[in-house]
Image (spheres, rainbow, N blue to C red):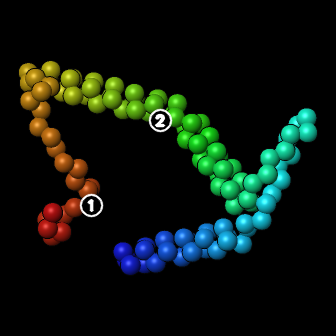
Amino acid sequence: MRFLSWLFRAAVFFILFAFALNNQHEAQLKWFFGFEFRAPMVLLVLVVFAAGAVFGVLAMTPNWWRQRRRRHATRASVSVNSAADKGVSVANLPVVPDVPLSASPRDGI
């Protein structure tokens, strides 16, 4: 499986490399008020792709922060409430590993 993953990555790399070699001609990007920018086509495509990726990450950041705050608040309230019921301090709670729900004694887990 690891070999197939690397093979796929190499294929994507060579396809993108061939795209870059085929698009080395100069492109002209015209803005307002007569301003124009000239650069190789592959550079313009790369800049637009990177700007889109940055915009996407920035658009998702508030949602990630909100989910992170909720997760930490939920964990803190569950840990404190369960520890308070048993009279145990939060610092002494054991770390319990995640166990798949479908585990059975025959699985060797």
Quadrant of the image occupied by residue 16: bottom right
Quadrant of the image occupied by residue 3: bottom left
Q: Residue at x 46, y 29 (%)?
A: 66
Which is nearer the N-term, disc 2 or disc 1? Answer: 2
Residue 9 to residue 28: above or below: below
Residue 99 to residue 84: above or below: below
Examine the rendering and report whether any part of residue 86 can be seen. no
Q: Nearer the viewer, residue 83 or 21?
A: 21
Q: Residue at x 22, y 53 (%)?
A: 99
Dot 2: what SS? helix
Read off the residue under disc 1. Answer: 102
Cα–Cα span, label 2 and label 1? 30 Å
Q: Are marks 2 and 1 in contact (CB under 8 Å)?
A: no
- Mark identifier at residue 64: 2
Mark 1 crowdedness (10 Å alpha carbons): few <14, some 14-19, many ≥20? few
Judged left or right of residue 104, residue 2 is right
Q: Position of residue 9 (x, y in %)?
A: 48, 71
Q: Position of residue 48 (x, y in %)?
A: 69, 50
Q: Residue at x 47, y 35 (%)?
A: 64
